[in-house]
């Protein structure tokens, strides 16, 4: 087996944790039953790698077989690495009728036109997502399978999720995507996160939505959740109002796991006690970053427990409303006397 | 401004009403769950985040026998919220019907100055200062037992003892060397 293929297998073995190996290999299905049985999964990773290497050589596997294995693992465990979202704009008339076979052919041919040596693998996942694995090479070198880019796209939606894409590869991928999905422009959607399912759910609003109602509290006789008649909450109504407003801003139930929200401020400094800073003409640039294991959950809790004032400020609620977590905020209107901030772009 | 008054209602038979005031609204729920399990008399627990209490509950609210302020020493806002709530309490409560309960006193995140402030606050108002551990069920049970002891007297369920008499024994005092820097 070629050196590069060996290294690819070693990389895949580093990626896949031992407890997932058996199921992933079974899903891959390229080993015969005897070969699968002959692997002792309790051995160390290094020993397992050697065992798999010998079986792959026996079966005369090439790079394309191994990339299939890697893709199966990543498709089942997408919540690693950093995913970025791109948005397709200006669809042409036939953008809504792009179907899978057409997309596959178009994408492969366009990308191969742009990059001489590139290895593309396209698979459809059970939830109708199209997964693309791209190993980039250039005019002089073969595709590098150790640093593949993964692209996830739901056909006929404007969002494209990418991971592991360098700035040099981005325009090539964008061009190929535009041509194969029949759109005219592509831009950064300002949303990123480690958890692919979370950013997808946020963008497609696949979490429980709470809508503003005229009568926010449920009917009294339906409220069976009173735990003990002897315990009474004095401020139950304001607490329920706060909870309702927090859920309206961020959503009810389990929320998608975002890790951070970044606000880049380009507003003028505002503090009347500090004249030197306020008199400057240029805006005071700073970056505010909110980070958490589950950011939306923390923000909702802040609002419902009264730490943040309700109604929730639009700066925070537009994270879920617009599905973004990177904002650039500039002053609106002339001079330091203006009180309004508008999230731009 | 609506003050909470101690003697504006008639007492209930064989029952006591306790009001737990806590900004974080965490410990009060676990305390309440254990307090209502008391069998010898009925304990009615009312939970609030801060005072003053809303006007809408004015008619249905029974006579509050004991007001407990729960302060989390790791949070400055907790202490400030408790101090602000004190203003909405009728002075009649400070004759043994108010108690301070402090959590996380041993935590590294709680500066010693804050404990001193809480101690001085309790001492100046002649109220007891209880220390509680809120993370384990045992801690909750212990805190509940101590509260019930004071509650029983405050509700008049212990013959020959009144809350004013008990407060002479339980009120917090400030050690005279509190201004001296401590050893750690």
Image (spheres, rainbow, N blue to C red):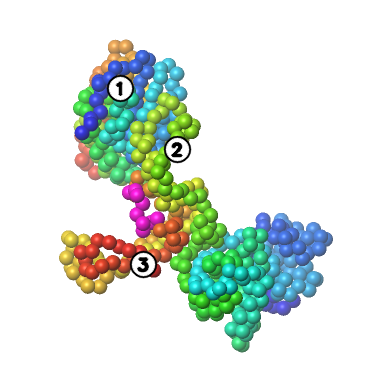
* In the rendered image, residues at marks 3 and 1 fall on the same chain: no
Q: Quadrant location of residue A320?
A: bottom left
Q: Position of residue A305 (x, y in %)?
A: 38, 44
Residue A200: % across, % down: 54, 60
Q: Secondary structure at mark 3?
A: strand
Q: Label 1: state its secondary structure.
A: loop
Q: Which residue occupies the foreground of this view, A181 or A234?
A: A181
Q: Is residue A46 magenta?
A: no
Q: Position of residue A341 (x, y in %)?
A: 30, 62
Residue drawn at point x = 37 percent, y = 40 percent:
A239
Label 1 and label 2: CA atoms lie apart by: 30 Å
Q: Is residue A311 magenta?
A: yes
Please give the residue where the numbered disc 1 appears in the rendered image. Answer: B63
**Mark 2: secondary structure:** loop
Task: State the extent of the magenta-drawn residues as a range.
Answer: A309-317
Label 3 vs 2, first from the N-terminus = 2
Q: Measuring from the top left, give residue A148's x and y in whole percent.
A: 60, 73
The N terminus of chain A lies in quadrant? bottom right
Q: Which residue is mark 3?
A: A344
Closest to the camera, between mark 3 and mark 1, is 3
Q: Is residue A72 above or below residue B130?
A: below
Q: Residue furthest right?
A: A34
Disc 3 residue crowd, few under 14, some 14–19, many 20+, Cα 10 Å: few
Residue sitting farthest toward the bottom? A140
Q: At 40% from the left edge and 58% from the top edge, which residue is drawn? A: A318
Pinpoint the chain carrying mark 1: B
Q: Who is closer to the viewer here, A214 or B148?
A: A214
Asked if the residue under mark 1 is in contact with the one under mark 3, i.e. CB atoms within 8 Å, the reply is: no
- Crowding at label 1, few (<14), some or many (≥20) Cα neighbours within 10 Å? some
Q: Chain of mark 2?
A: A
Residue assigned mark 2: A218
How crowded pointer 2 is (Cα within 10 Å; few <14, some 14-19, many 20+) is rated as few
């Amino acid at each position: 087996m070629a050196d590069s293929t060996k290294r690819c297998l070693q990389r895949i073995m580093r990626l896949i944790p031992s407890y997932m190996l058996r199921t992933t290999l079974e899903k891959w299905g390229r080993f015969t039953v005897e070969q699968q049985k002959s692997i002792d999964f309790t051995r160390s990773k290094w020993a397992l790698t050697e065992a798999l290497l010998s079986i792959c050589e026996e079966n005369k596997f090439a790079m394309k077989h191994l990339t299939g294995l890697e893709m199966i693992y990543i498709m089942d465990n997408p919540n690693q690495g950093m995913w970025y979202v791109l948005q397709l704009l200006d669809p042409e008339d036939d953008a809504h009728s792009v179907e899978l076979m057409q997309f596959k052919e178009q994408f492969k041919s366009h990308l191969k036109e742009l990059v001489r040596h590139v290895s593309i693998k396209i698979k459809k996942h059970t939830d109708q997502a199209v997964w693309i694995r791209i190993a980039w090479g250039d005019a002089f070198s073969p595709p590098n399978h150790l640093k593949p880019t993964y692209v996830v796209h739901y056909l006929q939606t404007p969002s494209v999720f990418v991971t592991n894409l360098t700035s040099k590869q981005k325009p090539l991928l964008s061009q190929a995507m535009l041509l194969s999905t029949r759109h005219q422009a592509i831009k950064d959607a300002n949303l990123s996160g480690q958890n692919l399912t979370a950013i997808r759910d946020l963008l497609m609003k696949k979490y429980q939505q709470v809508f503003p109602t005229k009568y926010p509290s449920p009917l009294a006789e339906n409220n069976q959740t009173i735990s003990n008649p002897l315990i009474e909450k004095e401020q139950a109504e304001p607490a329920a109002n706060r909870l309702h407003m927090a859920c309206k801003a961020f959503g009810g139930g389990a929320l998608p796991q975002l890790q951070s929200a970044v606000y880049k401020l380009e507003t003028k400094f505002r503090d009347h006690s500090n004249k030197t800073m306020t008199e400057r003409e240029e805006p005071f640039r700073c970056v505010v970053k909110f980070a958490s294991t589950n950011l939306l959950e923390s923000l909702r809790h802040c609002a419902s427990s009264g730490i943040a004032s309700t109604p929730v400020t639009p700066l925070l609620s537009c994270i879920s409303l617009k599905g973004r977590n990177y904002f650039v905020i500039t002053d609106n209107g002339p001079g330091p006397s203006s009180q309004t901030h508008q999230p731009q772009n | 401004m609506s003050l909470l008054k101690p003697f504006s209602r008639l007492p209930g038979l064989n029952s006591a009403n306790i009001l737990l005031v806590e900004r974080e609204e965490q410990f009060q729920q676990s305390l309440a769950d254990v307090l209502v399990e008391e069998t010898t008399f009925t304990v009615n627990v009312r939970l609030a985040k801060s005072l003053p209490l809303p006007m809408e509950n004015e008619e249905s609210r029974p006579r509050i026998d004991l007001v407990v302020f729960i302060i989390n020493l790791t949070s400055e806002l907790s202490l400030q919220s408790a101090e602000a709530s004190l203003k909405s309490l009728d002075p009649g409560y400070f004759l043994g019907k108010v108690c301070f309960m402090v959590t996380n006193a041993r935590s590294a995140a709680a500066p010693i100055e804050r404990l001193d402030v809480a101690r001085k606050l309790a001492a100046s108002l002649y109220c007891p200062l209880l220390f509680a551990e809120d993370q384990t069920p045992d801690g909750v049970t212990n805190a509940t037992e101590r509260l019930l002891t004071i509650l029983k007297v405050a509700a008049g369920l212990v013959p020959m003892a009144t809350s004013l008499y008990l407060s002479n024994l339980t009120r917090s005092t400030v050690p005279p060397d509190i201004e001296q820097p401590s050893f750690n």
